[in-house]
Image (cartoon, grey):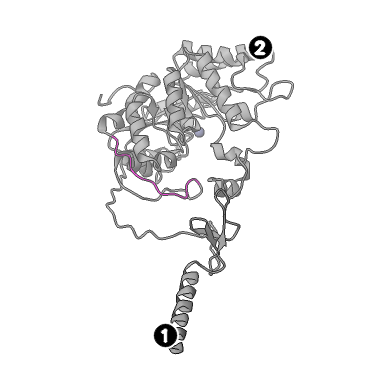
Amino acid sequence: MTSRRLTLILVLAAVCGALVSAQRGRGSIRIQAGEECPPGTTLTRPGECSRPELPPPTIVDYRPRSTLVTAEHKVPKAKYPVVDNHNHTNITAANIEQIIAEMDALNLRVLINLTGGDAAGVKQKMDFIRASKYPNRFRVFANVNWNNADAPGWADRAVKDLEQAVANGAIGLKIFKQLGMDTRRSDGSRQKIDDPVLEPVWDACARLNIPVIIHTGEPQEFFSPIDMHNERWLELALYPSRRQNAPGGPSFDDLMGERDRMFKANPKTRYIGAHFNWYGNNLGRAAKQLDETPNLVLEVAAVLYDFGRQPRGARDFFIKYQDRILFGKDSYAAEEYPYYWRVFETSDEYFDYYRNYHAFWKLYGMDLPDAVLKKLYYQNALRVTPGLPHDGWDR
Ligand SMILES: [Zn+2]
């Protein structure tokens, strides 16, 4: 071999080596199994982290445009009429015509305002609804004041007011998330959800044949450290009041445990777990709970992002438990309902959700069978809540 040929080979080898190391990224860092990439770097190969050469956008600003070309089936109107079992809209002379027009366009037949208030509040709302042109399109649930529930006479007063609220037209009882998180006993301690002092109210609901819809706690990650592993980081960064990780407060499992024991201790009372009891991200846990708690149904408000990211598992679950799931939305926004219809009714893939801070991921359709859609949209609600208007439904 001549020395010129040797030089050429050495030069070629050096060029190849430089190309390989350029491909490995500038300043790449090796990590061991179980280690994470250091801040500012990302995993580019198994065991290898690299630092982007360009300044990275923040998660607030990063909005990649999808190049996926695939079938789209927007669903502006639900396939069957719908009962929204979880709403908070007070119907007034000022908004009723616009809301009816929106409900008709969406195929929302009945809207249930869960913020009915005490007996007097329910009366004022139901008197307006009954006297309106649309007496069968709106209903209200009553609320109970749980403060100082351990004080003498509380249970009698609470039950009397609830009975009067039902006489005034309330068709259920709503429990807000304050019970368990903020509500206090007379000594200032936290009122637990499974405290037997609350039982006279559960008994009254069974006797009055009304369901109890309960919202307990917050999504699991609201109780976790707000760091770059928290999948709700953006929401927690945007909304300080949603952070539940202050020391001394109840944990996610404390609250879920209290609520779930209360369901079981009161088998004659019919409960609706709002927001899927926050088990939408763990359908195995939801299935076990439904199997063990025959007096419970679940409601889907504000957890669409959990079904839409596991469309096959969610589909199986909704088919298996088709008699145990109700529709609900929580915040009334006419432009948001069609996202629910699209997830439930289509097999569309990889489409946007309507709130970046709920879900930085895309949604997929569950393609539910018609018989399941009917149960989800209205048939289960008619069974669970006898006070709903029962005429005019296709059974
Ligand atoms: Zn609500």
* Numbered disc 2: secondary structure: loop
Vertical placement of residue 38 versus 86, above or below: below
Tell me the magenta residue range. 358-368
Residue 170 in sight in this render: no
Query: Is residue 352 toward the left or the right of residue 146 in the image?
Result: left
**Where, quadrant-wise, is the C terminus in this rendering?**
top left
Distance from disc 1 to disc 2, alpha carbons, whole Å, reads: 105 Å
Precedes in sequence: disc 1 or disc 2: 1
Magenta stretch: includes residue 360: yes
Q: Amino acid at mark 1?
A: Met
Q: Position of residue 104 (x, y in %)?
A: 32, 38
Q: Which residue is mark 2?
A: 153
Question: Does the Cβ of the disc 1 residue fall within 8 Å of ligand 1?
Answer: no
Tell me: residue 97, above or below residue 20: above
Q: Residue at x 49, y 71 (%)?
A: 22
Q: Is residue 94 left or right of residue 370?
A: right
Q: Which mark is residue 241?
A: none
Q: Which residue position holds label 1?
A: 1
